[in-house]
Image (tube, helix red, strand yellow):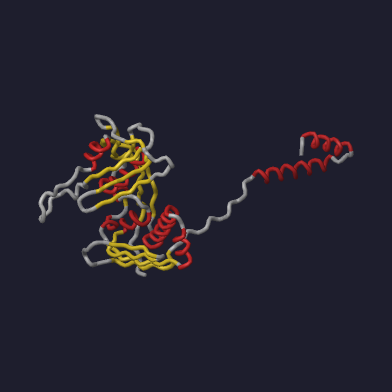
């Protein structure tokens, strides 16, 4: 209603001796406007898929390698620790960035069998990779909360990191040849070497990839401090430190450079030790699971 119409209406009502009606009308209009300005109550979010049944038992074998497998809505794991379930299945965070909790979370081992409802398993399988990963993490977070009474929270702490900077003689990066906007990375590895191929990637992308590699091995994030802009194509080849160790069969292998050396020699970049903010997962509470 325009101001002019409202004002004219008001004078007419008063001149007719209907002032009480004016108060009622204005109050009603004010309530309607207030209600219209309030956001609608959002519909409840759809419940995340969950395991329909789960069995968890302590593994007292006393040794052996751990293993796990997820296939068509079923999860089986043998000889795994709670910490490894948190790390790989529930939160996807490197072990060194999981803090707190009772000592047994890294020593006591379990066998786990869990199964989803077939319809929910089909829905999960139809999601793209990112959504599938998020939903799968949520399923395991709920499972661990139910069976281990696991309670956690996130914190940001000042911890050792690696700063990615230009080496002494400057970067050796080739501008991308991709004209259609395509981009991606692929990695290959064997027992004696690793290879990372990147197309149309920024140096920030490289730092994130190095974080995935080094946070798992050394528990450190890599932060881009080069200030280098643009996108590049590159190949990085190196030999992991553990793979370069001598063996009883072949002695010291004819290995390639370490990741740190390869970065300098092949890309003209280097990693320097520093400190910076790192997101960590803190365990507030965990209990041994009850018998099924």
Drawn side of residue 230 relative to residue 191, left or right = right
Q: Position of residue 231 (x, y in %)?
A: 38, 37
- Which is more toward the observer, 162 or 255? 255
Please say whether residue 276 is visible from this viewpoint.
Answer: yes
* Residue located 34% across and 50% down the image: 93
**Residue found farthest to the top:** 169
Drawn side of residue 9 relative to residue 282, left or right = right
**Residue found farthest to the bottom:** 292
Dividing the picture into quadrants, the one containing residue 206 is: top left
- Which is more toward the observer, 175 or 8? 175
Q: Position of residue 213 (x, y in %)?
A: 29, 47
Q: Position of residue 292 (x, y in %)?
A: 37, 70
Dividing the picture into quadrants, the one containing residue 57 is: bottom left
Q: Position of residue 132 (x, y in %)?
A: 43, 56
For the N terminus, the image quarter is: top right
* Residue located 24% across and 62% down the image: 65
């Amino acid at each position: 209603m325009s101001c002019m119409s409202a004002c004219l209406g008001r004078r007419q009502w008063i001149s007719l001796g209907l002032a009480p009606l004016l108060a009622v009308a204005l109050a009603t209009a004010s309530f309607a406007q207030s209600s219209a300005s309030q956001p609608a109550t959002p519909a409840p979010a759809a419940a995340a898929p969950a395991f329909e049944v789960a069995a968890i038992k302590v593994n007292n074998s006393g040794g052996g390698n751990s293993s796990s497998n997820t296939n068509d809505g079923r999860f089986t794991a043998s000889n795994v620790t709670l910490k490894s379930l948190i790390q790989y299945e529930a939160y996807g965070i490197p072990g060194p960035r999981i803090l707190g909790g009772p000592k047994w979370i890294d020593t006591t081992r379990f066998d786990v069998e869990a199964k989803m409802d077939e319809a929910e398993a089909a829905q999960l399988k139809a999601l793209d990779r990112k959504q599938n990963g998020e939903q799968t993490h949520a399923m395991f977070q709920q499972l661990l909360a139910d069976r281990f009474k696991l309670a956690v929270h996130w914190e940001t702490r000042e911890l050792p990191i690696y700063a990615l900077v230009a080496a002494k003689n400057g970067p050796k990066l080739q501008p991308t040849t991709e004209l259609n906007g395509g981009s991606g990375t692929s990695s290959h590895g064997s027992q004696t070497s690793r290879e990372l191929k990147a197309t149309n990637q920024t140096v920030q992308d490289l730092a994130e990839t190095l974080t995935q590699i080094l946070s798992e091995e050394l528990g450190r994030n890599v932060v881009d401090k080069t200030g280098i802009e643009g996108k590049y194509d590159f190949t990085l080849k190196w030999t992991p430190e553990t793979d370069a160790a001598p063996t009883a069969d072949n002695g010291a292998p004819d290995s390639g450079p370490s990741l740190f050396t390869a970065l300098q020699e092949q890309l003209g970049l280097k990693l320097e030790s520093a400190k910076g903010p790192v997101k960590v997962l803190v365990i507030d509470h965990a209990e041994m699971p009850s018998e099924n």
